[in-house]
Image (tube, rainbow, N blue to C red):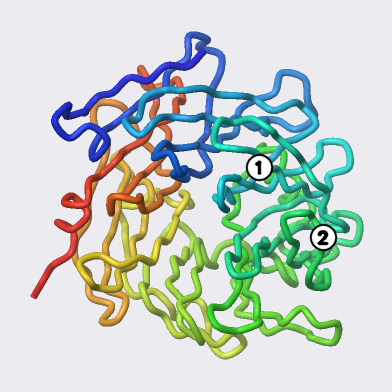
């Protein structure tokens, strides 16, 4: 049983601003949050990973938590052992929530759907896609852009499936590397899925305003960004990384050739709120508007394009070496840095995901370590006024 421990809740403003930690009596259980959305009732749902006691997939069970609009615990559920390895893909469409995971026996992708009370759970098969590694919801198509891995043929897979699991675009594949290179692709991919090795920042999405899809995955032995129209004869265009030492940590399309990106170069991290990318023509080592030595190497980074005080703003979220959650606010148009904000004190904190809220605020989920060693879900809710404070008005 979970319960909420509110560290910073002002009763005068209630739902506008709070900090909640969700503890559990069993110290042997740990949670790794993946994503957060606000539901139509003003509450929140957090998708997390948790260990399974009897499974071939280490640390890949699926947990759902519901909190009310004030950050108080409402309910939670752990899905059965047949559904494992959820990817950060939680989305709200109408009254239903959806995310992508994997069937533990077939390794095939599944679209899981449920309601805001964590009931009426269904799982629908996505034909042909195995080992799902990333997903991105496309609202105008009511479909997911999906990234997967074919372990038999050593191929990266990209496709688009509707909420019923039917493919609405062809399943496109690119060779990851057949072995013998400087890095052994299959070994590191399986370790990624088993959570026994490094966790790679796979991503996929639709280029804004175009029928083109971008993805961040292994191609020809290198962790690379690619573009494809998913047609049968399309060979793709690529911005190749350097093995798994140089590549992109996060990518979000802003339209045409503009992207908000985070890049890693060995243990260094760079952020750019509006980079012009032309795969095949640019060396990733030349991209990197701002270095951030304070960020934890290879930590989760999420990018949120939004509007604050009538300005187009890019918010980057990640984890710092000082064990806090860091938020970095940039002007999308001018690329100017506005400010940074840090969340978490007393306990160590790590960033997982963030979303804008209906009241103009910002909800951030992450993990905190109680007594320095018990991983627990946390939610920070910033008010609209808090969010506006991070944007400089000239």
Q: Is residue 106 left or right of residue 89?
A: right
287 over 183 or under it: above or below: below
Q: Residues within 10 Å of mark 2 (few under 14, many from 20)?
A: some
- Residue plotted at (58% across, 65% down): 139
Disc 2 is placed on an element classified as: loop
User: What whole-number distance in Å separates the C-alpha atoms at marks 1 and 2?
Assistant: 19 Å
Residue ranking furthest to the left: 394
- Residue plotted at (69% across, 40% down): 85
Q: Residues within 10 Å of mark 1 (few under 14, many from 20)?
A: many
Q: Is residue 214 left or right of residue 127?
A: left
- Residue plotted at (52% across, 10% down): 26
Pinpoint residue 218: horizontal percent, then vertical percent.
70, 65
Closer to us: 299 or 47: 47
- Which mark, residue 86? 1
- According to the picture, the residue beneath numbered tag 2 turns out to be 166
- Which mark, residue 117? none
Residue ranking furthest to the right: 152
Closer to us: 177 or 314: 314
* Number of numbered markers: 2
Pinpoint residue 148: horizontal percent, then vertical percent.
75, 58
Q: Quadrant of residue 105?
A: top right
Q: Nearer the viewer, mark 1 or mark 2?
A: 2
- Residue plotted at (39% across, 25% down): 369
31 over 240 or under it: above or below: above
Closer to us: 221 or 116: 116
């Amino acid at each position: 049983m979970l319960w909420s421990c509110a560290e910073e809740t002002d009763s005068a403003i209630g739902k506008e601003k709070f900090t909640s930690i969700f503890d559990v009596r069993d110290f042997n259980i740990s949670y790794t949050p993946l994503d957060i959305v606000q539901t139509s009732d003003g509450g929140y749902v957090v998708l997390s990973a948790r260990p399974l006691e009897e499974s071939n997939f280490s640390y890949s069970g699926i947990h759902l938590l519901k909190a009310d609009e004030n950050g108080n615990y409402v309910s939670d559920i752990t899905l059965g052992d047949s559904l494992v390895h959820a990817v950060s893909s939680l989305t709200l469409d109408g009254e239903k929530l959806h995310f992508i995971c994997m069937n533990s026996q077939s390794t095939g992708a599944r679209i899981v759907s449920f309601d805001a009370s964590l009931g009426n759970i269904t799982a629908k098969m996505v034909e042909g896609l195995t080992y799902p590694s990333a997903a991105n919801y496309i609202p105008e198509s009511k479909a997911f852009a999906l990234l997967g891995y074919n372990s038999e043929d050593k191929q990266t897979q990209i496709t688009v499936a509707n909420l019923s699991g039917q493919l609405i675009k062809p399943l496109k594949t690119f060779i990851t590397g057949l072995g013998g290179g400087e890095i052994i692709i299959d070994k590191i991919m399986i370790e990624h899925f088993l959570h026994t090795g490094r966790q790679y920042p796979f991503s996929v999405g639709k280029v804004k305003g175009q029928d083109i899809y971008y993805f961040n995955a292994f191609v020809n032995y290198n962790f690379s960004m690619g573009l494809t129209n998913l047609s049968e004869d399309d060979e793709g265009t690529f911005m190749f990384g350097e093995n798994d030492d140089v590549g992109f940590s996060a990518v979000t399309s802003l339209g045409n050739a503009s992207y908000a990106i985070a890049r890693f170069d060995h243990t260094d991290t760079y952020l750019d709120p509006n980079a012009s990318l032309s795969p095949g023509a640019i060396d990733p080592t030349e991209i990197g508007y701002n270095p951030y030595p304070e960020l934890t190497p290879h930590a989760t980074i999420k990018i949120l394009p939004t509007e604050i005080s009538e300005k187009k703003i890019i918010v980057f979220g990640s984890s710092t070496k000082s064990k806090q959650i860091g938020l970095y606010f940039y002007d999308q148009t001018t690329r100017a840095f506005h400010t940074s904000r840090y969340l978490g004190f007393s306990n160590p904190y790590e960033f997982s995901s963030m979303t804008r809220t209906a009241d103009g605020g910002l909800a951030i989920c992450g993990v905190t370590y109680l007594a320095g060693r018990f991983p627990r879900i946390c939610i920070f809710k910033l008010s609209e006024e808090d969010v506006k404070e991070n944007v400089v008005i000239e």
